[in-house]
Image (spheres, rainbow, N blue to C red):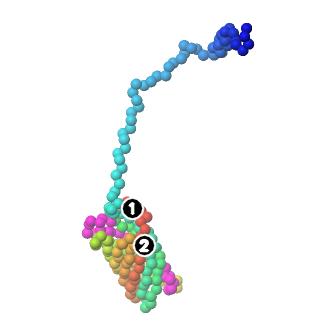
């Protein structure tokens, strides 16, 4: 007998013990995995997305942004700073290329009080830039007096920012003239 080599009888005993150890499983109960001959149906490929051309500006916009103006009212110059929200439907190649409304609020820097306004807007494309007119009522607010009602008409142009000029009248204060700028930041486009 050579040391380190097990006899074949030992190997047979170990193998019989390992095979006999799993006697609780029935070898005839084995069911092989079934394979379906047909692969699962594929979903239809998603059509490629098409995006609008970036030069196509047609759509409905919500523009929000600051507004500032210099005004001649009550026989003196004063300035206002505030905010403006405009909803505008743009159709570049139509005669009425822009239709919409504007709502704004501004505070006087020297006089105290402020101004609220709402305007209807109509514009057309002129040499690639939108220009138009606006008109609407306004409410002049004061720190020490009752609100005064007025109205204004104006012209505007959109060149990335919106410069404007308007004239109007306020009950009890008389006529006014104003030049200003609205920085229209597109908040929503549909």
The quarter of the picture where residue 1 lies is: top right
Disc 1 marks which residue?
189
Residue 55 shows in this picture: yes
Q: Secondary structure at mark 2?
A: loop
Q: Position of residue 9 (x, y in %)?
A: 68, 8
Q: Secondary structure at mark 1?
A: strand
Instruction: Residue at 42% x, 87% y: name it.
Output: 72
Of 121 and 144, which appears nearest the observer? 121
Farthest residue to the bottom: give it.
Answer: 75
Q: Position of 109 compared to 3: left or right?
A: left
> In the rendered image of this protein, does residue 189 appear above or below residue 69?
above
Q: Is residue 95 left or right of residue 179?
A: left
**Considering only vertical position in the picture, is 9 above or below 157?**
above
User: In the image, which is nearer the foreground, mark 1 or mark 2?
Assistant: 2
Label pair 1/2, CB-CB below 8 angstroms: no
Quadrant assignment, res 21: top right
Left or right side of 17 for 152: left
Was residue 103 drawn as part of the magenta stretch in this picture? yes
Q: Nearer the viewer, residue 141 or 134?
A: 134
Report, in whole angstroms, how far the alpha carbon at label 1 lies from the one at label 2: 16 Å
Which residue does the numbered mark 2 point to in the structure image? 183
Query: Which stretch is magenta?
Result: 90-116
Identified at 39% across, 33% down, the residue is 41
Q: Which mark, residue 157? A: none
Is residue 140 in the magenta section? no
Seen at 73% across and 13% down, the residue is: 3
- From the viewer's perspective, is residue 27 above or below residue 121? above
Q: Quadrant of residue 129?
A: bottom left
**Residue 94 in picture, x, y percent from top left:** 26, 66
Q: Position of residue 149 (x, y in %)?
A: 42, 81
Quick one: label 2, few (<14), some, or many (20+) residues within 10 Å?
some
| Residue 17 visible in the snapshot | no
């Amino acid at each position: 007998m050579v040391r380190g080599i097990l006899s074949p009888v030992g190997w047979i005993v170990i193998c019989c013990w390992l095979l006999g150890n799993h006697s609780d499983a029935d070898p005839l109960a084995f069911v092989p995995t079934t394979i379906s001959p047909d692969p699962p149906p594929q979903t239809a490929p998603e059509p490629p997305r098409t995006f609008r051309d970036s030069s196509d500006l047609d759509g409905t916009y919500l523009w929000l942004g600051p507004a500032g103006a210099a005004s001649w009212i009550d026989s003196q110059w004063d300035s206002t700073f505030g905010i403006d929200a405009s909803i505008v439907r743009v159709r570049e190649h139509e005669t009425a290329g822009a239709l919409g409304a504007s709502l704004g609020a501004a505070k006087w820097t020297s006089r105290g009080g402020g101004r609220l306004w709402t305007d209807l807007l109509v514009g057309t494309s002129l040499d690639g830039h939108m220009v138009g007119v606006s008109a609407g009522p306004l409410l002049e607010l004061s720190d020490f007096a009752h609100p005064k009602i007025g109205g204004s008409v104006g012209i505007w142009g959109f060149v990335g920012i919106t410069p404007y000029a308007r004239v109007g009248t306020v009950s009890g204060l008389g006529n006014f003239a104003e030049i200003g700028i609205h920085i229209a930041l597109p908040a929503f486009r549909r």
